[in-house]
Amino acid sequence: MTRLPLSYPAALLIAVVAVLPVAVLFALSDAPQDLLGQRNLGLLWNTALLTLCTVAGAVLIGVPLALLTAFVRLPLGGVWLVLLAAPLALPSYIGAFTFYAAFGPGGEINNVFGFATPSAQGLVGASVVMALYTYPFVLMTTRSALLNQDASLVNAARTLGLSLPACLWRVVLPRARNGIAAGALLAALYALSDFATPAIMGLDTFTRAIYVEYNAFGLGQAALLSLQLLVVVGLVLFLESRVQVTRERPGRSLVLWPRPWQVGAIGFAVAPICLLALALPLALFSLWLLRDGGGYFDFALAWNSLQASLLAALVAALVALPVAYAAMAGRFGRILERTTYLGFGIPGIVMGTALVYIGLQLSFLYQTLALLVVAYVMRFLPLAVGSIRATAESMDASLVKAARVLGAGRGEVFRRVTLPLTRRGVIAGAALVFLEAMRELPATLLLAPTGFETLATYLWRVYEAGYFGRAAVPGLLLILMSALGLALMLSGEGRARPDFFKDNTA
């Protein structure tokens, strides 16, 4: 008789909890009145347009940069990669905040330099900001696919008379479509789930409407809008699943050596991206800090962010262990793991709406830090699960077998062999959850205890009040923490790192 893996019961319980928010939304939602009314169709149109424009922009920026960083040998190549990947670590609402304050008549660019710039609001402004902060998804996943390609096919095509651009278009990119599709999916999910960017840019989308309904005590209508948004998210996931994945054996990667003038041209071409996504927020926050000072800032807000994020990271790492090991134990475990990924696909504003109702039913949880930590864990658990599983799968299975042969029980093997060998993945997963929780805005706005402000919610209150100068210290702190997170991800050791951060050209 086959023994049930010890990780299954705990993983099953966690999977049930992951599905709970969707069940709550169904129970809570109002009857679908005027489902195809003008307002709902307008929200759907704006949400779809923002998502499509974000994906298009992310692909148009990310794919050329992936080709550049994968194949072109640039001086200080690692520095180029870090700079181009850096927007991945920043929350898009920082970009939206600075774009809103910098551009347009009366904006900071107008005040400092004396010339007017177009306003960065509406669909165009939101799409530009979202593309600038989601293209690294496409860059990294496409780069991973490119680095695994064998250059022999390109060399054969060149021999047959194709130019290098034609080879890239007809030979290289079609073989990288799975990487491009994966990055585009992440960009689309980010655009669908983001609340602050369209809200700051004045664009009515599902996430903004859900927040408005919640503040107007229309919890049932907010739940209905949340379910409609989840349908859109499900459609995006379905479309991505239809992309056929072609696997090939890794080979020696293509290497291109640019001339000095070409290096200068490349730097000139990528400079606007770095200036808008990185330099603009840093310059604007620094300007506000010099002009208004930072004495007004209460550093207890930083402690609040740190406290909630550390708790979420610790709980997520503990909860992720049985899920990751269940996924390795069998098919049912993999199903349970995929179920927990549902939380990552649920926008924060939707997760918050569902958990508010749960908190109202369980008064001991309502308006508590514990409920906020639960939201963080449910949202970002897949990050910890993926990191732990990647590390555990690289472990030598013979060590576990040897321990069992020597008489150790399954619990002792886990405690003395498996857990120490996967410690690196546990720490990396907890770090990723910590960084995501630090910058999470919509779920924090809905679930934080009364009077409990974090760096993210303080930035939002500053935007609502129009006191932009007071955003300097929290904005710079968030950028600093995001930079540390990016350094952690790019400098992770061995197999604990995600595959797309590895350079396979050595």
Image (tube, grey):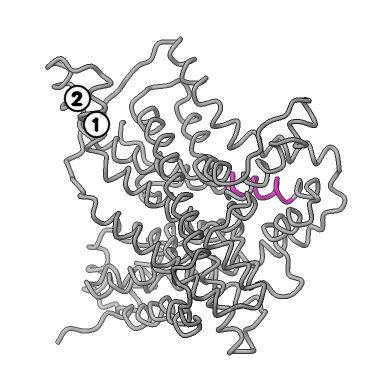
**Residue holding disc 1:** 172
> Is residue 340 located in the magenta-colored stretch of the structure?
no
Residue 480 position, x and y percent, is 65, 45
Where, quadrant-wise, is the C terminus in this rendering?
top left
Residue drawn where x is 49% and y is 39% of the image = 85
Which stretch is magenta? 474-484
Residue 199 position, x and y percent, is 62, 55
**Residue holding disc 2:** 154
Are the residues at dot 2 and dot 1 in contact (C-beta closer than 8 Å)? yes
Please name the amino acid that badge 1 sits on. Val
Q: Is residue 200 left or right of residue 43?
A: right
Q: Is residue 377 left or right of residue 115?
A: left
Please name the amino acid that badge 2 sits on. Val
Where, quadrant-wise, is the N terminus in this rendering?
bottom left
Alpha carbon distance from label 2 to label 1: 7 Å
Residue 87 position, x and y percent, is 54, 41
> Dot 2: few (<14), some (14–19), or many (≥20) neighbours within 10 Å?
many
Occupied quadrant, residue 445: bottom right
> Dot 1: few (<14), some (14–19), or many (≥20) neighbours within 10 Å?
many
